Amino acid sequence: MNCREAREAMLVAEAMELNGAGSSELAGHVATCDTCRALGRSLSADLDALDAAVRNRSRRTAKIIVATLPIAAALVAGATLVHRASPPRAQSVGTTVSPRTVSVQVAPGHQAAVFATKDTNVTVVWISTEGGI
């Protein structure tokens, strides 16, 4: 393999081959050619930096999504409860209203708090991760 072929092969090579490791023809050439070894190491370092940037961005995106989930869940639960609520019935003075029942299932590692409000058609459900974000 010559340097021109090696540079073309570097476009689709695995990181270990760029560093001269492995048994491929490219790895063998990179291990013996100073110019291609320097290029391979440079490409490998750039790939490592790109990988780290992508991982950090993915973590930030995941944290934003996780941070907004409790708010979204509360809004959906509130809208669902309001939508499903039956119209109020006429009641005579002295009768009692049966308490509302709310059932909430949360994923492991999450917790929920349910708050009744003065409005019998509105219940607030707050879902959060244990220990915060």
Image (spheres, rainbow, N blue to C red):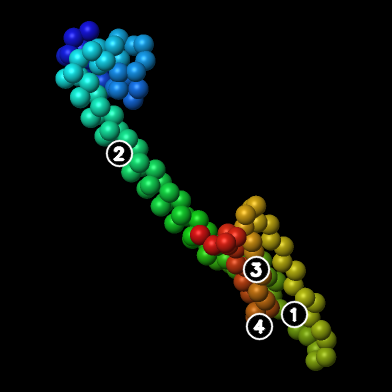
Residue 75 placed where, x, y %?
55, 66
Query: Which dot marks residue 89?
Result: 1
Which residue is denoted by mark 2 in the rendering?
A: 49
From this view, report whether residue 21 is shown above or below residue 76: above
In the rendered structure, which disc, 2 or 1, sits on the residue that comes first in sequence? 2
Q: Amino acid at mark 2?
A: Ala
Which residue is denoted by mark 3 in the rendering?
A: 113
Q: How many residues crowd mark 2 within 10 Å: few (<14), some (14–19), many (20+)?
A: few
Q: Secondary structure at mark 2?
A: helix
Residue drawn at 30 percent across, 15 percent down: 27
Q: Which circle, 1 or 4, is nearer the viewer? A: 4
Question: How far is mark 3 from mark 1, CA to CA?
Answer: 28 Å
Q: Secondary structure at mark 4?
A: loop
Question: How far is mark 3 from mark 2, CA to CA?
Answer: 42 Å
Q: Secondary structure at mark 1?
A: loop
Q: Amino acid at mark 3?
A: Ala
Question: How far is mark 1 from mark 4, CA to CA?
Answer: 17 Å
Q: Which circle, 3 or 2, is nearer the viewer? A: 2
Which residue is denoted by mark 4 in the rendering?
A: 118
In the rendered structure, which disc, 3 or 2, sits on the residue that comes first in sequence? 2
User: Residue 36 falls in which quadrant of the image?
Assistant: top left
Q: Which circle, 2 or 4, is nearer the viewer? A: 2
Question: How far is mark 4 from mark 3, CA to CA?
Answer: 17 Å
Q: Which circle, 2 or 1, is nearer the viewer? A: 2
